[in-house]
Amino acid sequence: MEYKKVYVKTVLTLILIYCTFFISSLFRSDFYGNIFSPIACMATLVIMYRNTSRINGKAQPLSKRIWAYLTLAVLAWTISDIVWSFYYFFTPFNPGESLFLIHSYSVSNVFIFAAEIICAVEIFKKWNLLQLILDSVSIALSTIILLWVVYFNSSFEIVKMISQQHIVDNIMFVLDIAALIGILVTAFSIRQGKVSLYTKLVIYGVFVFILGDLHYLYQTFYDLYNPNSMTDFTYMVGFLLIAMGSITKNYWEHLKIRETFSYINVGLQHRRLTIFIFPVIALLFRNFDVQIISNFLVIIVFREIMSSYIQKYIEHERLLSKEKEMNMLLEDKIKQRTMEITKKNKQLEIKNTELDYMSKKDHLTNLYNRRYFFEKFNNGFLSTLDSGRTALFYIDLDRFKIINDMYGHHVGDMALIEISRRLKLYDNDDSILARLGGDEFVLVKYGDFTYDEFSQLADSIIHDCNAPIEIGEYMLYVSASIGISVYPVDAKDSYTLMRNADLAMHEMKDNGKNGFIFFDSKFSDKAKRKLLLENLLKSADYDKEFSILYQPQLNIHSKKIIGAEALLRWNSKELGSVSPEEFIPIAEETDCINSIGLWVMEQAIKQSAKWNKMCYNVKVGINVSPKQLDSKNLIETLTRILEENSLSPKYIDIEITENVAVAGEYKIHQINSLFGSLGVSVSIDDFGTGYSALSYLKIFPFERIKIAKPLIDVIATDSFDYEIVKAVITLAKSIGIRTIAEGVESEDQLEILTSLGCDEVQGFLLGRPMDKYEFEKLLKNN
């Protein structure tokens, strides 16, 4: 807003200065005219110079040059005006009599023409040449005819007389005509593009200046010119308009608006009737002259017709150019798209190769996976039937779950990777090695090998698996069980070969683990019996086929019965008596253990409630499997059964296996939170048979440890096992955990356990498992 006020003040001040010269010119006062004319010129020069110097020459080089020439035009005129005034006021010499001084004013014409040429070149180089030539010829002819009528009065004599004037005047006349035609061509030819206000002011200023100069030359020819007259004021009006254009440009620059000279002579002409200004002016100076008017009309009609054809041609060329451009763009797009498709295809090939590789490989061990192994094995089996024996080694790592539970799956994964690395040593051209999943691997060996060679290979694999595995701060020891099935002795097809190796591997696990065994047909019989037991378990009538025996647990010092362990027995109506060691693992595998465990829990709690109502106050131990611990409804079910039988939780002892107990500190506290809130006690069953460490005792939140029977069996004969039992009892006492020894069958064992400080005992020496009636009699006698 502040800058706008400055702009308005500057324009008004300049107009006011020019008004003083206008008044002196109106009254033809040489005295005041020679004062105010130089003042107006100097004011114009100061404004022009200041605004021109503000133009950035690097950003606007063309605009800088045009305004520089216009400023020089004002400078030349100002110098001539000052010299004129000096002669007028300070010398007796009449400045009007000096041809040099008079012609010095013509320098301004040269600079203005130069500025117009620079501007025209910049504008016209973007224009259509045919239309420009047509417009230039038409405007030039119309201008010449108009000057012929107005300026020369249609007389060749006048032309001849004017041409005999001073050469400077003739040159200025030619420059004025050329400049006038240039302005008119520009004005009449622009068809598209908006001309800025300050550009219009400059054009009007130059146009007025040229008209003033032509009028001056006309007056000079007829000896009518007087200094400081309205003719001189016409020049000054031209400079005033140019100066106002300069002021406006500077204001627009402040508003970040710049001239782009983006005018073209292509398209629909909106001011086509303005060309009739030529015949109209001619009629004002001459009565109706048919020939003159006809000349104008011929030029106008010719221009319109030719313009129509030229514009159609230009539009046609534009469409062709656009079509070519679109075709080129389309070709580029097609080329680009083709390149993209080619690139995508290459990427797809790479991805397919990667996917094919990933589909064949196990992501952890980088061995073949289960799916690809069976595909490759089946295809390879058919192609190698005549190459000799084919042996399939089914490898399973023993109790590997314990490593995952104790150290975490990350350590377990690292161990599997190391085992896989060792197994790769046996993966040659005549073999296939794969990871079936979890801790199971399979190795197929093709060729004419003997059983001894297969045995040596299995021994070597087991030896490599047994080597210590160092992972960070842990030192792990892994064993492996291997089942071997040989074609064509053990199977005639790949499926049977695989199944038989699996059966042999499980047989090895059942017979001590960490070894290998060749398939034997009796393994199939064992598998068939296992399947039979599985089906019978699923259809068994628990109330009729299952029963519970109770083995007494006694205080080692007083020999008083303090509890009993509930032991499940199965008398199948098809098979008769089935050992718990045989059917319990099957029940675990088939998930029947949950329903069986629930039945045992209900029967044991119901019986305990009866005994405690009879004031025997015995605690019944109930075995709970790992799968039961994972059940969401275990505590809810146990609570419900206790409430239904009105039994206090303190008379129930939950026995969990050592494997669960050493599964990690998180698992231990999870078990404690399950049963601790309920009020039942928890015991560790078969302690010392697995991977338990004495250091775990300090974090056990349990009431009792049951020392495993295998340790008790040899306590009197094996010093090593004796020391283990001693250490367990000693450490348990130090941290307040009771100990009970399982499987006490001799007086020597009882005596040693008594001396070691064991709290409780259980075994055949003190009482075999018995039904509830016998146990009740035992309670009465005890």
Image: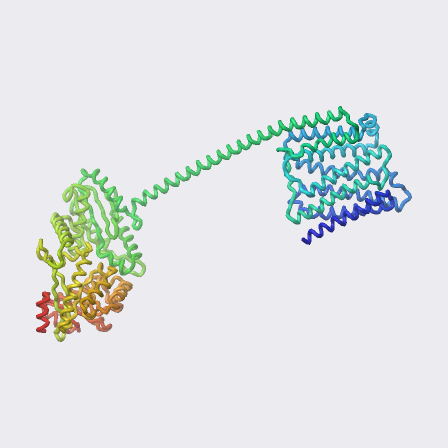
Circle count: 0
Q: Is residue 486 left or right of residue 191?
A: left
Residue 511 x/y as whole percent = 15, 55
Q: Specify the farthest residue to the top.
A: 291
Expressed as whole percent of the image width and height from the top left, the position of residue 333 reads 47, 36
Give residue 567's quadrant in the image: bottom left
Q: Is residue 148 left or right of residue 95?
A: left
In this rendered view, identify the residue nearer to me: 345 or 304.
304
Residue in the foreground of this view, choosing between 700 and 439: 700
Image coords of residue 552 (percent x, y): 12, 69
Query: Looking at the rendering, in which quadrant would you find the C terminus?
Result: bottom left
Check the image and tell me how it is coloured. Answer: rainbow
Task: Spot the residue most to the right.
Answer: 92
Query: Is residue 155 visible from the viewing direction of this image?
Result: yes
- On the image, the x and y values in percent for residue 208 come to 76, 38
Q: Left or right: where does residue 277 sit relative to residue 646? A: right
520 w.r.t. 191: above or below = below
Q: Residue at x 12, y 63 (%)?
A: 548
Q: Quadrant of residue 276?
A: top right
Quarter of image, res 697: bottom left
Q: Is residue 727 visible?
A: no
- Residue at the bottom extreme of this rendering: 558
Task: Left or right? Give the position of 756 relative to 366.
Answer: left
The residue depicted at 24 percent of the width and 61 percent of the height is: 633
Q: Is residue 218 above or below residue 682?
A: above
> Looking at the image, is 123 positioned above or below residue 598?
above
Residue at left offset 68%, top offset 54%: 2
